[in-house]
Image (cartoon, rainbow, N blue to C red):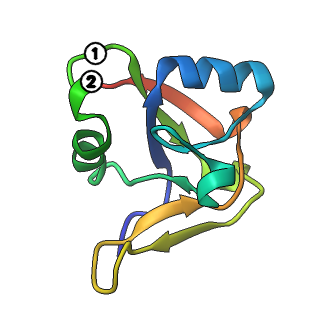
Amino acid sequence: MPERTHILHITERSRWEAAREHGAYTMSTRGRTLAEVGFIHCSTRAQLPSVAAFVYGCYESSDELVVLVVDPARLGVPVTYEAPEPGAEEFPHVYGPIPVNAVVEVEPWR
């Protein structure tokens, strides 16, 4: 069973800065919004390296990427652990915007 404390979301620094101005983060994944996908893709700490490589491989050495550390108790929307296909590893999905006050830490990626 995955650890279900803080969840993580990797994103571009500029996207996070824009969210701070608006009060909520609404990108689902690189280039796709919450409105388009229906949830925000997140991961556990153990899942983060493979997610980062898959979604942002071209940015691996860039300081443009940050990791949002999210406290699910502060979200006010459902978090569901789901697999992309039957039998696959489950990932946390946030079914609504992430309020900026739910982000308890912002870490640089590598």
Residue 18 lies left or right of residue 42; in this view the side is right
Q: In screen coordinates, is 46 left or right of 69? A: left
Give how far across and how far down residue 81 sits, in percent.
Answer: 48, 71
On residue 62, the disc is 1
Question: Could you say whether the residue bearing mark 1 is in a helix, strand or loop?
Answer: loop
Does residue 2 lie above or below 6 as drawn? below
Depth check, front residue: 25 or 67? 25
Q: Is residue 30 above or below residue 38?
A: above
Q: Nearer the viewer, residue 68 or 85?
A: 85
Residue in view at x 58 percent, y 24 percent: 16
Q: Tell me: residue 86, above or below residue 3.
A: below
Real-space CA distance between mark 2 and mark 1, rounded to the nearest whole angstrom: 5 Å
Disc number for residue 2: none
Q: Residue at x 22, y 34 (%)?
A: 57
Residue, disc 2: 59
Residue 4, given in percent of the width and then of the height, sits at 47, 63
Say what amino acid the circle numbered 2 marks: Tyr
Q: Please name the residue shown 48% across and 62% down the image.
A: 92
Q: Quadrant of residue 90?
A: bottom left
Please give the name of the residue rendered at 62% of the width and 17% of the height, measured from the top-left corner.
Answer: 17
